[in-house]
Image: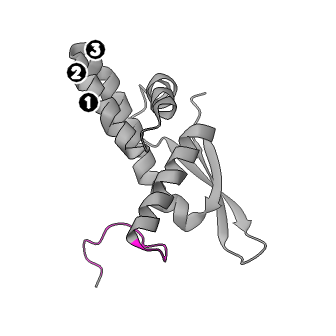
Amino acid sequence: MRHRVAGKKLNRSAGHRTALRRNLVRALFQHEQIRTTRAKAEAIRGQAEKLITLAKRGLVAAEEDPTRGVHARRLAASRLNNDRTLVKKLFDEIAPRYAERPGGYTRMLKLGPRKGDAAPMVLLELVSEE
């Protein structure tokens, strides 16, 4: 039984899985869209959306108390391998874009099977506010 078991193993060890998720989330924020398998996209979608929500709350908290804004930036940095430029992009460009949106910051578009092994491929992208 799989009751209350969160996350997907992706046929990898714990360290490899953590590194894979961090790299995919970083690539998503850096390029604002990535082409990957459906299983990997489903595994990182929640993490990416939680980071955007953290950044949104950090911006709101920074207006009231600057130390809470710094705390949010440090939490985001720890989850993005301490990449300062990516944290800056997340807080200055990505989070303000979704200030009025209550959730659902990513979209998965099916691309069909991969040629080599027929794995279902998707395009995971950040939703544009238009």
- Distance CA(mark 1)–CA(mark 3): 13 Å
Extreme residue toward the bottom, this view: 1
**Residue at numbered disc 2:** 67
Residue type of the residue flagged with mark 2: Thr
Q: Which residue is mark 1?
A: 71
Which of the labelled discs sits on residue 63, or is there none?
Answer: 3
7 is within the stretch colored magenta: yes
- Residue drawn at (21%, 17%) of the image: 65
Q: Amino acid at mark 1?
A: His
The magenta stretch is 2-13
Residue 54 picture location, percent across and down: 33, 36
The Cα atoms of the two marked residues, 2 and 3, are separated by: 10 Å
Q: Are marks 1 and 3 in contact (CB under 8 Å)?
A: no
- Location of residue 69 in the rendering, given as x and y in whole percent from the top left corner: 28, 24
Query: Residue at 43% across / 44% down in the picture?
Result: 81
In the displayed structure, would residue 105 be above or below residue 120? Answer: above
Q: Is 39 located above or below residue 21 in the figure? A: below
For residue 11, side relative to residue 4 (left or right): right
Q: Is residue 127 magenta?
A: no
The answer to the question of whether label 2 and label 1 lie on touching residues, with beta carbons closer than 8 A, is yes
Of 58 and 77, which appears nearest the observer?
77
Pinpoint residue 100: horizontal percent, then vertical percent.
41, 26
Numbered mark located on residue 80 in the image: none
Q: Viewed as shown, does residue 36 lie left or right of 39?
A: right
